[in-house]
Amino acid sequence: MKPLISIIVNCRNGSKYLEKCLISIKSQKLQDWELIFYDNNSTDDSFKIYQKIKNDKFRYYKSTKTETLYKARNLACRASKGKYIAFLDVDDWWDEEYLSSRYEALQNEEYDFFYS
C-alpha cells in the first residue's frame, strides 16, 4: 500500500464547479487518498453537491464562520491523516492520472515539497 495522500478542498460557495472537482478526485487512478472537504460557511448548494458525490474516503468539515483561505487550509490540514497533502481548489479539477503521475516525485527524498 502506498502512503496516504490527504487532498484538501476548501469550499466557499463553490457549487458552480464543485461536482466536476469532486468527480475528478474520485476518478484518480491512484486510490491511496482521503479527501478533507472544508466547507467554509457556504450558503449555496455546495453541501447538496457534496452529499451527492461523496464516498467513504470523503470527510466533511463545516465552519460556522467564514475563515480566510489560509486559516481554512490550516484547519483542514490538522484533520488530515496522510503522509502527503495536496490542495485542490473547488473551481479546479484533475486529470485521472494527476496523483499517480506525481507519486514518483513525492517519494524522492531529495525534495522537501512539490507543486505544479
Image: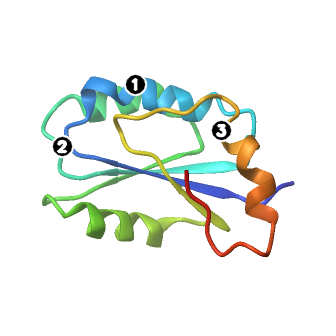
State the image quarter where residue 45 is shown: top left
Type of amino acid under label 3? Tyr
Q: Say which residue appears at 52% left-offset and 26% top-offset.
A: 23
Residue drawn 12% across the image and 38% down it: 43
Q: Badge 1, how many Cα within 10 Å: few under 14, some, many 20+? A: some
Mark 1 or 2 closer to N-term?
1
Say the numbered circle drawn on residue 19.
1
> In the rendered structure, which disc, 2 or 3, sits on the residue that comes first in sequence?
2
Cα–Cα gap, marks 1 and 2: 15 Å
Q: Is residue 5 above or below residue 51?
A: below
Quadrant of the rendering where the N terminus is positioned: bottom right
> Which residue is disc 2 drawn over?
42
Q: Are marks 1 and 3 in contact (CB under 8 Å)?
A: no
Image coordinates for residue 42, horizontal then vertical, percent: 18, 43
Q: Amino acid at mark 1?
A: Glu
Where disc 2 sits, the SS reads loop
Residue matched to label 3: 98
- Residue 84 pos. (x, y %): 64, 64
